Amino acid sequence: MPLLSGRAGGNLPAAAARMLAAGGLVEEPSHRESARARKVPSAKRLSLFETCANQGCGSGWLHLFRSRSAPVFEAGWNCSAACTEARVAAAVGRELDGTGARIENHRHRVPLGLMMLEQGWIDAGQLRRALGAQKTAGAGRLGHWLVQQQGVSESLVTRALGLQWSCPVLPMEYHDAESLTALIPRLFVDAFGALPLRVAAGKLLYLGFEDRLDPVLALAIERMTGLRVESGLVQESLFRSAHTRMLGSSFPQVELIEANSEAGMVKAFSSSIEKARPVESRLVRVHDFLWLRMWLRPMTGAVPEIGSVQDLICSIGMH
Ligand SMILES: [Zn+2]
């Protein structure tokens, strides 16, 4: 055993062990530490890698002879490609069955115009004319017409939307799009109109939206990044320019997968994990997408470096 531990220690990047340890994923060693093990800072963590995370693993003690320290999927090491696939299959099933994608907000909302009228921010004439313009044009949100045609200030409309959604209006100062692109794939920033604004204290992500929140996306980002997400609205004109700027920045490498069956998705995800041998990988559903993220190196801060993560996104079609 000491020999095996020492050998595995050589294969396990110290930083990877630190990352796993920091995530609270590591079992305390219940046994001996050889002189050699003490020399390697990560050697204490080895007990994790002696157990395949696949509960149905059939390799028994034989897997101790395998020199793999990666890949890791959802905080568990997999001793073989077959075990990776079994665990990915369970995760894909869990995400497809989950109700996570169907959280919708059914709370009754006071219509924006009435809300603004009630607050005394517009008068009945302004509301009537804006509603008329919206009807005639057959397009545009009421807030747009209030601003464009009735001269209502944009920040009042945003405040009213914030009341309507019971969420804060988030400020846009110091938005550094470049430093936040590694948080979520460009596809989600684009398709769901979400704008990561900033990370506070390494724990809290402020996520901005233009006119409505997306709790499904916010929850998926929490599960993926481990950051708590605080959603809010951003004033339209500020949102638009920042959003455009962010979409023009560089994002982590992403692969869009086409799969016409659950088995096909499992194959694609698990073979990517086997190929990339990530130090961690996670799978979450975001609306009609499955998002697999692989960390090729341990994180050094709250936001991964762009080159250290790789995303796979698979459309699961309408259910
Ligand atoms: Zn196994």
Image: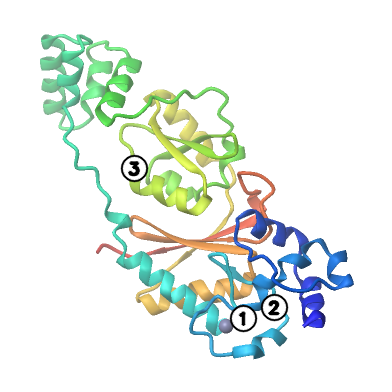
244 displayed left or right of 280: left
> In this orientation, which residue lies closer to the viewer: 277 or 153?
277
Residue located beneath label 3 in the image: 214
Residue located beneath label 1 in the image: 79
Q: Earlier in the sequence, mark 1 or mark 3?
A: 1
226 displayed left or right of 122: right
Mark 1 and mark 2: span between their CA atoms? 7 Å
The C terminus, quarter of image = bottom left
Q: Is residue 202 above or below residue 51?
A: above
**Residue shown at the point (34%, 42%) measured from the top left:** 214
Q: Which type of secondary structure does the marked residue at label 3 adopt?
A: loop
Disc 1 marks a residue whose amino acid type is: Cys
Mark 2 neighbour density, 10 Å: few (under 14) some (14–19) many (20 or more): some
Disc 3 marks a residue whose amino acid type is: Asp
Q: Residue 61: percent from the left, percent from the top?
A: 64, 89
Q: Is residue 4 above or below residue 92?
A: below
Q: Which mark is residue 68?
A: 2
Please tell me whether mark 1 or mark 3 is closer to you in this view: 1
The N terminus, quarter of image = bottom right
**Residue shown at the point (19%, 42%) measured from the top left:** 106
Q: Which type of secondary structure does the marked residue at label 2 adopt?
A: loop
